[in-house]
Image (spheres, rainbow, N blue to C red):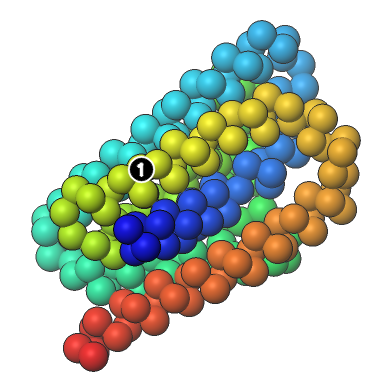
Amino acid sequence: MTGMLSLFLVSLSAVFFVVDPFAVVPIFLAMTRNDAPEKIRAMCLRACVVAGGLLVFFALFGGLIFKIFGVSLAAFRVAGGVLLLITAIDMLKAQPSPTRTSAVERQEGEVKDDIAIVPLAVPLLSGPGAIATVMVLMSKGEGLLVAVPVVLSILLTFVVTYYVLRAAGLVQRVLGQSGVAILERIMGLILAAIAVQFMADGGRDLLGR
């Protein structure tokens, strides 16, 4: 029971920090500045459902990718940790991470009529870093039991993300640019520690120790 609670807390921290809805707020506001409130709420809901569903899919079935490509779990832990560390470093700098979305994708989003699926759900909310994170978390145990805390963490993360995006204007006003940057740096620091742990676990397994 203690192990499951520990995995849940680690999973919730890792998933929430890598999805990082607060960092998406300024981009989201820029992309939806001309849209009606009803349309914004509908896009928030669809984006969170699609992004959450995608992460749940990779959490449950991502292990098949290991077998198809002959990749060991240890190697993927190291690779996932490296990708997560890059994201964490960008968060510590309070700058948009190129592993999540590029400048071209953000510009395209500003002129698109509907941004719910692309680029909001993918890659802003469920980019390569988030996908790698849930797959690495699933590799921390065996059997379907390990999926419970991971999937629950994903669902909770996107429930919070939905309400953060719905109240994006209020969040921006309350936190301000400096508040968002400070919060992102704190999240980045914790995410960096989780990334290093992923790499350490994978490296130990690769070395057979």
Quadrant in the rendering for residue 137: bottom left
Count of marks placed on residues: 1
Quadrant in the rendering for residue 107: top right
Q: Which amino acid does label 1 sit on?
A: Val
* Left or right position of 7 against 76: right
* Left or right position of 165 against 47: right
Q: Name the residue: 40% across, 77% down.
A: 199
| Pick the front one: 35 or 77 | 77
Q: In which quarter of the image is the C terminus?
A: bottom left
Is residue 40 placed above or below 205 in the rendered structure? above
Q: Name the residue: 57% across, 14% down.
A: 42
Is residue 203 placed above or below 140 in the rendered structure? below
Residue 95 place in picture, x, y as percent:
71, 57
| Pick the front one: 132 or 9 | 9
Mark 1 highlights which residue?
151
Q: Can residue 96 be seen in this view?
A: yes
Quadrant in the rendering for residue 168: top right
Q: Quadrant of the N terminus?
A: bottom left
Residue 205 place in picture, x, y as percent:
24, 82
Residue 52 place in picture, x, y as percent:
42, 35
Is residue 129 placed above or below 74 in the rendered structure? above
Q: Can residue 90 be seen in this view?
A: no
Q: Name the residue: 80% across, 29% down.
A: 169
